[in-house]
Image (cartoon, rainbow, N blue to C red):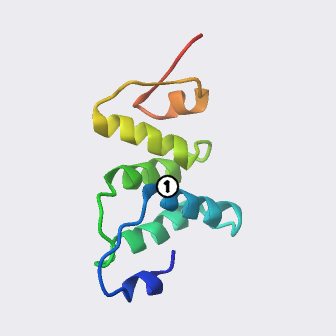
């Protein structure tokens, strides 16, 4: 996500949360950018006046993801969406997510 690209827009745009997840994945995996730096870069774009939208869940997911190296951003995002919707606990078969995110509980079965 280029700050320059988004800062020069004539009118505000909304960036889909899934696109943000993909950008963070590419930054981390393909460009070896540290998670904290990925978070900072994504936040810089989301804070632009030309980027509009409710990014509460993705921001929360980025915060968890940046400090929990064993968790994936998609898992953090799903847990944060569940938390925001009041749909907790989020039942999961993912042991890492259940042990590291307060909204998630391990489903047995």
Q: Where is residue 104 drawn, in percent x and y? A: 45, 28
Question: In the rendered image, which quarter contains the C terminus?
Answer: top right
Residue hosting label 1: 18
The relative height of residue 56 versus residue 23 in the rendered view (above or below) is above
Is residue 66 rendered to the left or right of residue 89? right
Residue in the picture at 54% in, 49% down:
73
Residue depicted at 41% across the width and 31% down the height:
102
Q: Is residue 83 above or below residue 29?
A: above
Judge from the rendering whether residue 40 lies leftward or rightward of residue 71; answer left or right.
left
Q: Quadrant of residue 80?
A: top left
Decide if residue 38 is on the left or right side of residue 14.
right
Of 83 and 10, nearer the camera is 10
Give 35 or 85, whichever is nearer the viewer.
85
Q: Position of residue 84 (x, y in %)?
A: 30, 40
User: Residue 21: where, in percent of width, then height?
Assistant: 52, 56
Using residue 56 as the reference point, say whether residue 79 is left or right of it. right
Q: Characterize the local packing of mark 1: few (<14), some (14-19) or many (20 or more) Cα atoms within 10 angstroms.
A: few
Say which residue appears at 34% left-offset and 57% top-offset.
Answer: 55
For image coordinates 51% across by 74% down, the residue present is 1
């Amino acid at each position: 996500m280029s700050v320059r690209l988004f800062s020069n827009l004539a009118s505000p745009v909304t960036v889909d949360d899934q696109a943000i997840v993909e950008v963070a994945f590419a930054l981390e995996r393909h460009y070896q950018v540290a998670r904290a730096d990925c978070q900072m870069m994504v936040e810089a774009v989301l804070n632009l006046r030309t980027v509009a939208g409710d990014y509460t869940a993705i921001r929360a997911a980025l915060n968890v993801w940046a400090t929990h190296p064993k968790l994936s951003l998609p898992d953090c995002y799903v847990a944060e969406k569940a938390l925001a919707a009041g749909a907790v606990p989020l039942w999961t078969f993912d042991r890492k997510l259940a042990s590291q995110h307060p909204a998630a509980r391990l489903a047995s079965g």
